[in-house]
Image (tube, grey):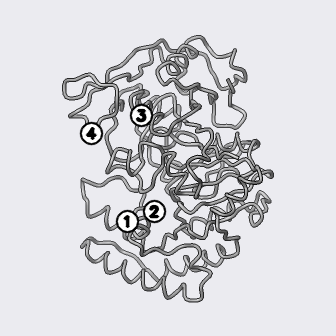
């Protein structure tokens, strides 16, 4: 049985949590394959907004098992807070949530290292969420990290102590003023680890291999977005993991020939949190309107998102490197009321017109070239059928499908799971 993927195609915050929640009824297993609690997946239903950071977005459905894969990095403290928030919904967490033994742990000193590293960069900072993600992946690739499976060993605290001591020495190297009380942080950490150990740890690659043989339907859930991929994103303003389709293979142990549909999610416009180049960013009233109407604030950090017109050059790039087979367009309702809409269909790159994403998209090298389209006034939030969509929105969708050569199967017209139009 093939494993389907669900990925963000921009700089994250595309609405993956909502779509996983919408699609979960069709799957037996939802598996998160990369990233850490720097992700914020927002789900809204029954008048309640839920924000998940590490736990897969299928957790609210009785039919689905949820797996945190080996490619994920886990902060026990944040994980415990997520678990605490779910207790009031009477979810049988212990039977619905499994964690890979090969997933790496974020230690308190990883967060301190993150803060020290970012402070040392000064104006060159990359906009880290300061969750310790980068230092944890550095320890992973440096073969120094602690994994979930280590918690089952008798000497795990000794291993923790050795790594934390090393981190403290590294913090001193940065020569910045980072105030902290490690004993206080460790007290919270060890209490969270105790709760984490009450959950079920598995050899997730074997579990998923057997599930495929049994014909179980599996959806792999990505975090962040393709333009934040450590290899293919706008480096160095990226995350520390592979957010693209290939990351699902390494982050879950799924063979490439077992990948089925690749579902790509994008907003009808573009947003970005933190630092980094953003060719279509708006600094005018249109950008302000997008941010206000779209409630564009980070689900994890609360930081306001930068807003701009849809960048089709970057989106086409993401479609190509992921092998996207179907698309979901989010937040179409936010564009209601604009008289004219712009879509970036090419770049002026150092004097040449190009239609691919170049190595460097800093503003001194790239100027967006726009195609203008008619806007629509109709409020979309109450619509339920594709035939109800205004003609101008259908023209917008048709244009995108022609350019991207991939069908748009879902149009989201609001944050609630019911505000979803299937085409």
Identify which residue, 41 or 205, lies in the foreground: 205
Q: Secondary structure at mark 3?
A: helix
Percent across and percent down for residue 317 are 41, 34
| Viewer-side label of 4, 1 | 4
Percent across and percent down for residue 93 are 74, 63
Q: In the visual, does 75 lie left or right of 50?
A: left
Q: Which residue is mark 2?
A: 131
Mark 3–mark 4 distance (CA, rounded to whole Å): 14 Å
Q: Which residue is mark 1?
A: 114
Q: In the visual, does 364 lie left or right of 200?
A: left
Q: Earlier in the sequence, mark 2 or mark 3?
A: 2
Q: In the visual, does 143 lie left or right of 4?
A: left
Identify which residue, 331 or 311, lies in the foreground: 311
Quadrant for the C terminus, please: top right
Is there CB contact under 8 Å for labels 1 and 2?
yes
Q: Earlier in the sequence, mark 4 or mark 2?
A: 2
Q: Which residue is mark 3?
A: 317
Q: Earlier in the sequence, mark 1 or mark 2?
A: 1
Q: Earlier in the sequence, mark 1 or mark 3?
A: 1
Is there CB contact under 8 Å for labels 3 and 4?
no
């Amino acid at each position: 049985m093939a494993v389907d993927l669900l990925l963000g195609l921009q700089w994250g915050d595309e609405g993956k949590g909502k779509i996983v929640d919408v699609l979960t009824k069709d799957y037996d297993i939802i598996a998160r394959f990369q990233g850490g609690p720097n992700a914020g997946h927002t789900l809204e239903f029954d008048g309640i907004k839920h924000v998940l950071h590490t736990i897969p977005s299928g957790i609210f459905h009785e039919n689905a098992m949820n797996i945190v894969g080996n490619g994920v990095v886990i902060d026990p403290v944040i994980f415990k807070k997520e678990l605490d928030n779910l207790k009031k919904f009477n979810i049988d967490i212990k039977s619905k949530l499994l964690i890979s033994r090969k997933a790496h742990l974020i230690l308190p000193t990883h967060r301190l290292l993150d803060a020290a590293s970012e402070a040392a960069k000064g104006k060159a900072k990359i906009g880290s969420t300061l969750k310790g993600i980068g230092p944890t992946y550095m320890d992973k690739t440096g073969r120094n990290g602690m994994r979930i499976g280590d918690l089952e060993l008798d000497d795990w605290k000794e291993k923790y102590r050795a790594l934390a001591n090393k981190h403290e020495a590294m913090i001193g190297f940065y020569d910045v003023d980072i105030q902290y009380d490690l004993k206080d942080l460790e007290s919270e950490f060890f209490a969270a680890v105790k709760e984490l150990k009450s959950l079920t740890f598995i050899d997730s690659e074997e579990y998923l291999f057997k599930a495929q043989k049994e014909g179980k339907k599996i959806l792999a859930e990505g975090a962040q977005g393709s333009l934040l991929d450590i290899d293919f994103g706008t480096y160095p303003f990226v995350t520390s993991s592979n957010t693209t389709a290939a990351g699902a293979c390494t982050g879950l142990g799924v063979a490439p020939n077992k990948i089925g549909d690749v579902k790509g999610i994008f907003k009808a416009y573009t947003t970005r949190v933190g630092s980094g180049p953003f060719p279509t960013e708006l600094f005018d009233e249109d950008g302000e309107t997008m941010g206000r109407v779209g409630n564009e604030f980070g689900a994890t950090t609360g930081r306001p998102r930068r807003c701009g017109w849809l960048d089709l050059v970057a989106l086409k790039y993401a479609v190509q490197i992921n092998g996207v087979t179907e698309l979901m367009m989010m937040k179409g309702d936010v564009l209601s009321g604009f008289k004219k809409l712009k879509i970036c269909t090419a770049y002026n790159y150092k004097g040449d017109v190009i239609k691919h994403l170049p190595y460097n998209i800093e503003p001194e090298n790239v100027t967006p070239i726009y195609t203008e389209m008619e806007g629509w006034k109709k409020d979309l939030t109450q619509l339920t059928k594709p035939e109800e969509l205004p003609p101008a929105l259908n023209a917008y969708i048709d244009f995108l499908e022609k350019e991207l050569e991939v069908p748009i199967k879902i149009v989201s017209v609001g944050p609630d799971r019911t505000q979803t139009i299937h085409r």
